[in-house]
Structures are given as C-alpha cells and as structure tokens.
Amino acid sequence: MPSSQKNVKPWFAVREPLSQKRATCLTFLSFLMPILIWSAFSYLPFLWHPKVEITQPGSVTWLQPGTLIDKAIFKEQQILAEKNNTALPEGKPANPVYLPAPHEVVVAFYTAFTTEPKRRSEQWLHESLWHSVTIVFWGFFISTLIGVPLGILCGTYSVFNKLFEPFIEFFRYLPAPAFGALAVAILGIYDGPKIAIIFIGTFFQQVLVVANTTRKLDIALLEAALTLGAKNINLLFRVVIPGILPNLFKDLRILLGWAWTYLIVAELIGTSSGITWFITQQARYKNFENVFAAIIMIGIIGLLSDLILATMGKRLFAWENSRGKIA
Amino acid sequence: MSTFSKMIPSFIAQKVAPVLFGLTAVLSLNAQAKEPLKIGYSDWPGWVAWEVAIEKQWFKEAGVDVKFEWFDYLASMDAYAAGQLDAVAMTNGDMLVTGSSGAKSVAIIINDFSNGNDMIVAKPGITKVEQLKGKKIGVEIGFVGHLLLLNALEKVGLKESDVTLINVPTNETAQVLASGDVDAIVAWQPNSGQALEQVAGSTAIYSSADEPGLIYDVLAVSPSSLASRKDEWKKVAQVWYKTVDYINDPKTQPDALKIMSARVGLKPAQYAPLLKGTKLVSLDEAKTIFKKTDTFSSLYGSSKASDDFNIKYKVYSQPEVLDTYIDSSITDSL
C-alpha cells in the first residue's frame, strides 16, 4: 500500500476484518439499539402508549386510580362527564402491562435476587438458576458423551453412516416436548425427565452436525495418511479427530445454545423447578417485569458461557485464528 | 482434573444410572413401603392451603411422612396418571376424566368448592344472563367453565344453541374479552379477575357463588395406596381439617395468608380476594357434602353432573361408577 494514500479503511469492505476499535463500537451498539428502541416506546408518551392509566377517577364510579383502560374508552368517559357537567376523569398515557419500562425490569432484576425465601421449602433465585444450569449441563453432557463419538464414526465410515443416520434423520423431526409424559412415566417427576428432554432435543441434531463436520475434513489429509500406512484406529485418532477438533468445538458451542432453548419446556415437565418455575408463576399473575428480568438472566448466562467457550477455543486452537478468519 | 475424575463416579450414580435404568428404579420403588406419601398439588387457593400445614410442620407433628410436590395443574395429573404420585389435588370432574383413561382415584378429603372464583364476565352493557341470548361467548369447551355456563343458561331457560360458543383457552380469556371479539367469557381466577380489570365496565353476571358445589376440589388418592396405608391417610386428613380451621379463623387468617401468598409469589393483600372466592370446607361441612344426594350440595350430585357433562361432550363414552371414586369413611371417622 503506498504511504501517500490515506490510511482509512472503508466501513463496507467484503470479508475484511474491522479494526478493533470499530468492532468494539459495533458490539456495543448492537446491544444499545434494542435498549434504545425499548426505552423510546417506554418513556416517550407520544410513542404508542395505547392505554390510559387513571390518576383521578373523577365522577366515573367504576374507575380506580391505577386502572389501565383503552384510550378510546377513556375519551368516551371524558366526553360523557363533560356533557353531564361532572368531574372529569384524569389519566396519563400508559403501555399495556406486558411491556414494562427498562427501569422497572432493572429493579425487578435486583429484587429477584435479594428477596429472601419466605417458605421453608423455597429457594433463593440464584439457587433456582443454578438448578436450571445443572439440568442443561447434564442433558448436554450425556448427549455429547454418546453423540460426538457416534457422529465421528458416521462421518468417517459409510457403514455407520448407513446404519444410524437414516433413523436419526427420522427421529430428529419428533418434537422433544412430545416425550414429556412418557419421560415422567419412566424417569419419575424430578430431574430425570427434564434432563431426558434436553437430551432428546440435542442428541439427534448433534450426531448429524458432528458427522457433517467430520465429512468436511480435507480428503487430502486422509489420503496422505493412508499412503503413509495409517490403519483404522490410528487414522481415526491421529488424523480425523485432531483434524476436526477446532470445528467440533465450534459445533458444540452452537449445540449448547440449542440445549438451552429446550430448558423451559423441559422444566415444565414433572415438578415445577428452576428458573421456569419463577417465569411461569410470575407470568400467571402478570408480573411481566419479573418475567423480562428472568429472560434476561438466561440470556446473560448463555452469552457469558459462550464468551468463555469462545476464549477457550481461541487458546486451544490458536492455529485456526492465524489464518485471518472472521471470528 | 482430579476433581473432575472424582466427579465421574458420583455422576454415574446420580444422573446416568437413573436415566438408563429409570424403568427398573420405578418398578423397585413400588416394592418399598417406607417411602413418604407423595402428593401433587398446584396453584389453586384450596390446594395452596396445604402450604400452611407444610410450613407449620403439622405433618411431622401428626407422625406422618408426606412429601408435597408442586406442579402445573396439567403436569400434576400427568404425573399421577403415570403412577408417580400417591395422590393429587384435582377437581371432582377431572378426577372422573383422569379415571376414565385408567388412572382411578378415590376422593377422601374435600378441600373446597369454588365460591365465586369461576365467573361469567360480560362486556359493559350486559348485566344479566338472559341478555346473553344470541351473543358470542368465549369459553374453553369441555372444561369446568363450560359446565358453569350451561348451568347459568339453564337457570334462565336458555339452551346452549341460543348462544355462540367460541373455544378460547382459559388463560387467554381476558385478552379475548378486551379485544371485543366476544360479548362474554367464562374463566376462573386469576383470569376472571384480570378480565374484570382489563375491560373497564365489565361485570361478573354469574359466578360459582350462584351455584355452590358445581365444582369441588378434592384430594384424590390412588386406591392401592389408600388400601395399604389407610392409617397414614387418616392422619393427613386430620392435619387438613386442622389447617382449614386455622385459615378460616379470623385471628390466624393473616398468618395463613402470609404463607399462602408466599407460595404463589403474591402479597398477602393481593391473595385475600382469591381466598374469598374459595370456600374451604370444615370437617362438619365436609361430612355433609359427603352425604349422598343428587343436588350440588353433595359431592355425589356434583360428580353426577360432571359425569353427564363429560359423556355429552364425548370426553369419555361410558358413565363412571361414582361409588368407586368417593370414600367418606376417613372424614366420617374424624
């Protein structure tokens, strides 16, 4: 690059990595945008706000301070009161109860963790959350224990491919929650059926994804190894597995996210437990700020675990990143 | 690394083994008699009431080993039907439905009857059941709300064909009424209360308080558990009626409300109206309700009405033998 040219890279360059500063800036923005939109809808009274929150019922007997009613009905009542020359009801624009404002959710987030358990059998929220994390972990762990070896075999040998994949292809279309009642009948009402649902939701996809990754391994590597006299077991452990390891790690990161998405349905099966118990109970009584807070908690846990895994991946497979790929 | 390898054997013992050998575990479980009585309950004031006895440790006091498991209502019936529970809290109508598909049970305790919590909520302008003629009504067809609606229509000489029924899941009724697509909805608390709150000017034109006993809530025990451990169930019944007295006594009610509201995540003041719409029955009242008559003031009469309703709407095809579902002997002996 001639030094006379201005050293400013264009923002829109196909498959060119951005500078560190720009990348950080955009990451920040990707979170800021939804929060700004949410704040706008919550705090700007002229934006949306289809309801009216009554502050002064005036002469309208059936209204109470704090009631939410439709704008149209509120106007009707105002006109009616005006006609009859009675006290006007007063109110301010409000959103429906299912859209709490950001600050309400922040408060709910904080109080959810600081509220002491009131009953003997109740848990702190972080204990419930931890319980959910363990459910996901075991479901994913058991699935990986069987799914990864099976996937590698299917991707390497046609025998295993033809023996297992057709059935797995069939089974992966069956919705995991459909096995809920069956899982309870076999595994009881506690963690067993919940772990089983996460397993069913993850395992079949996992085998196929891993098999596919294995198949993508450069054939030249295998040919070279064969030429040099590598035999089955050696080939598998010294060529195939090391060859796919970086991509396998990426697959597992994605599949872990997949396992998380089954958490809520899994925890609805059997006894109510974990973060799902908190979410469903709060939703039933329309405490949506708590529901939002809990959803955000799950998001944070997911994001953090993914960040940790991504950093681990960079350390473990340093040679992958040196190729200048977009992470 | 070493901690991880230490984890593996315990992992196999705790997690993998039950997953792989769950079936054998369940089979062998049936052979053990020392297990606590396992009871499933869910979010309804008459069942949240158990929480008072649990919190006060009255079961321990009475010398009976019970374990209460909290479920979503449908999940609790599934778990009972799968043979995972000794007893479950159900309505008498659902007890028949669950029994018709194989999981029989026996009602030994009457918890409560709905006394206003189930309502028909109509939009502004409709104040009487008679006015429903020709109107659209949102209701979960084939469930207790439907039964309540038919009961209301019958009382004013209307037939089901005089109104248009729209099938709406009960937990969406409030939004459906607010949308204006229907003229009235049928729901129970907390959904009925939300409908009243969300649709300003709407009124409850009929409620379960107008026909007490249409829906009873009971403790439905598995026949085999009842036969083999009747003494223990008797102690459970004793604790229950003690709990009812504690909740109904104005002096101790605030304390009870505190415990119950904590179970569902509400404030005591928010829970008070829900409790009011539920009539918890005392021991003497329960004895009367267990007497066999064909009115709604008897568990038999009420269950007969549910049975007829279930057959009419093809929930199941053969009438259930009600005598096998109701056993008043424990309550009567107290």
Image (cartoon, coloured by chain):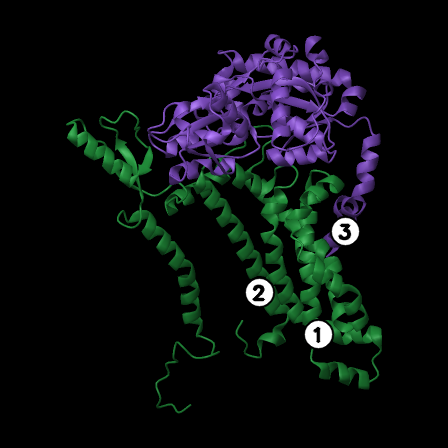
The residue beneath circle 3 is B8
Asked if B253 appears above or below A306 in the picture, the reply is above
Q: Quadrant of the N terminus of chain A?
A: bottom left
- Chain depicted in green: A
Q: Crowdedness of circle 3 by 10 Å Cα count: few (<14), some, many (20+)?
A: few
- Residue at x 44%, y 22% (from the top left corner): B206
- Residue A91 picture location, percent across and down: 25, 36
Q: Residues within 10 Å of mark 2 (few under 14, many from 20)?
A: few
Q: Are discs 2 and 3 located on one and the same chain? A: no
| Subunit ID for the residue under disc 1 | A
Q: Quadrant of residue A22?
A: bottom left
Q: Is residue A265 visible?
A: yes
**Disc 1: which residue:** A215
Q: Amino acid at mark 3?
A: Ile
Q: Of label 2 and label 1, which has the lower sequence position?
A: 1
- Of circles 3 and 1, which is in front? 1
Q: Decide: few, some or many residues near mark 1? Use Cα within 10 Å; few <14, some 14-19, many ≥20.
A: some
Q: Position of residue A301 (x, y in %)?
A: 55, 52
User: Of A19 and A273, which appears nearest the observer?
Assistant: A273
Say if B182 sits above or below A252 in the image: above
Which amino acid type corresponds to the residue marked 2 in the rendered image? Thr
Nearer the observer: mark 2 or 1; the answer is 1
Tell me, for residue A311, which label it has, or none. Answer: 2
